């Protein structure tokens, strides 16, 4: 005899296919886990409407966000990765690169020239989708050439970082990019041309220890991870727990390593304003000035 007898049970009616939410219509915020409508989320520049968390943008989305429409011209795509160390980890390096190209990028940085509020700039935007935005010799070379192009043409340079650091598969050749990019920035500075570094989540390790931290002005998106070694490594080394908000934008700014924390929706205007302050370019062609220029001109 059974201990419990199923007398009656209600049959659960699964919702019909047409009643269900179509796939891709909703998504969850990575931070607060609240559901948001995908369309609203995209329109809000991938910033959570509930908690304000800034989700990662692709390099092309970033370029579309901060530059004048149709003004970006890509450069240096002829510089492509080789396998100088014949490196093999869980797979060989050429196979890893081939897989990474499915992201739609041919390397972890997109470089070129563009205009921001009518002002021409040399621009490099890192692509986190390509091997975690890691800096190998191609990333270093493309960024160096972008800086050198700025120096040769008299253009301000902007680098938007989003990277976990140097690319281990290229070993010492990756680390050499730190010195090379820094040297190019010193030559840019010698020409009195401005360099603005924009830090997105994450901006860490060898990238942060070179060009990302060398801006005349350094701005970051809210709550981006910014630092050299990861918090866990630091905690294990110093045997102390780290303070709340450690290595996040606001914390880094309060400790003097960052000039501004700028929300994504204001980033283009902020860059336009910085270029206005730092270049004072005279215009022949019509262009839209960033908000705040009129007030600055009146002073
Ligand atoms: Zn959220």
Image (cartoon, helix red, strand yellow):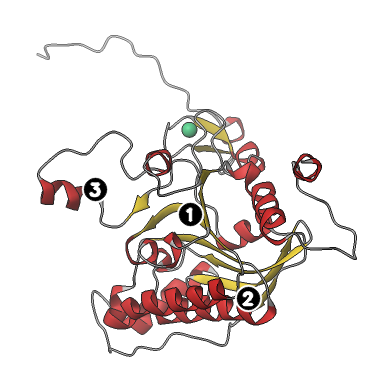
Image height of 218 relative to 52, above or below: below
Give the residue pinned by disc 1: 199
Quadrant of the image containing the N terminus: top left
How many discs appear?
3
Choose between 63 and 204: the one closer to the eye: 204
Mark identifier at residue 231: 3
Q: Nearer the viewer, mark 2 or mark 3?
A: 2
Disc 1 to disc 3, how far (Cα)? Answer: 18 Å
Disc 1 to disc 2, how far (Cα)? Answer: 20 Å
Crowd band around label 3 with a 10 angstrom C-alpha radius: few (<14), some (14–19), many (20+): some
Labels 2 and 3 touching (C-beta < 8 A): no
Residue 92 appears in the figure: no
| Helix, strand or loop for disc 3 | helix
Mark found first going from the N terminus, 2 or 3: 2
Residue 165 left/right relative to 43? left
**Residue at point 33%, 45% (across, down):** 247
Give the residue pinned by disc 2: 150
Q: Residue 165: percent from the left, percent from the top?
A: 35, 65
Q: Nearer the viewer, mark 1 or mark 2?
A: 2
Crowd band around label 2 with a 10 angstrom C-alpha radius: few (<14), some (14–19), many (20+): many
Image height of 21 relative to 287, above or below: above
Choose between 30 and 238: the one closer to the eye: 238
**Residue at point 30%, 41% (across, down):** 246
Labels 1 and 3 touching (C-beta < 8 A): no
Crowd band around label 1 with a 10 angstrom C-alpha radius: few (<14), some (14–19), many (20+): many
**Residue at point 62%, 69% (across, down):** 193
Image height of 64 relative to 20, above or below: below
Q: Quadrant of residue 252?
A: top left
Mark found first going from the N terminus, 1 or 2: 2
Q: Residue 107: percent from the left, percent from the top?
A: 49, 75
């Amino acid at each position: 005899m059974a201990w419990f007898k199923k007398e009656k049970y209600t049959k659960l009616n699964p919702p019909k296919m047409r009643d269900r939410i179509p796939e891709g219509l909703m998504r969850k915020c990575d931070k607060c886990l609240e559901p948001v409508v995908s369309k609203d989320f995209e329109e809000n520049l991938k910033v959570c409407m509930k908690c304000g968390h800034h989700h990662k943008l692709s390099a092309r989305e970033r370029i579309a966000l901060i530059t004048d429409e149709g003004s970006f011209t890509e450069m240096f795509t002829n510089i492509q990765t080789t396998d100088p160390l014949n490196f093999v980890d869980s797979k060989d390096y050429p196979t890893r690169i081939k897989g990474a190209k499915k992201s739609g990028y041919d390397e972890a940085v997109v470089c070129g020239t563009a205009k921001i509020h009518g002002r021409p700039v040399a621009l490099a935007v890192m692509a986190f989708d390509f091997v975690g935005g890691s800096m190998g010799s191609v990333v270093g070379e493309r960024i160096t050439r972008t800086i050198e192009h700025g120096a040769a043409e008299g253009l301000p340079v902007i680098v938007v970082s989003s990277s976990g650091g140097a690319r281990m598969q290229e070993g010492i050749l990756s680390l050499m990019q730190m010195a090379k990019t820094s040297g190019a920035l010193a030559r840019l500075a010698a020409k009195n041309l401005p360099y603005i570094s924009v830090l997105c989540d994450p901006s860490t390790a060898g990238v942060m220890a070179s060009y990302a931290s060398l801006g005349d002005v350094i701005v970051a998106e809210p709550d981006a991870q910014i630092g050299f070694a990861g918090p866990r490594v630091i905690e294990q080394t110093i045997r102390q727990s780290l303070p709340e908000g450690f290595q996040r934008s606001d914390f880094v700014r309060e400790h003097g390593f960052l000039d501004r924390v700028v929300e994504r929706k204001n980033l283009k205007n902020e860059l336009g304003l910085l270029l206005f302050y730092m270049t004072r370019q005279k215009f022949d062609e019509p262009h839209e000035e960033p908000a705040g220029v009129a007030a600055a001109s009146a002073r």
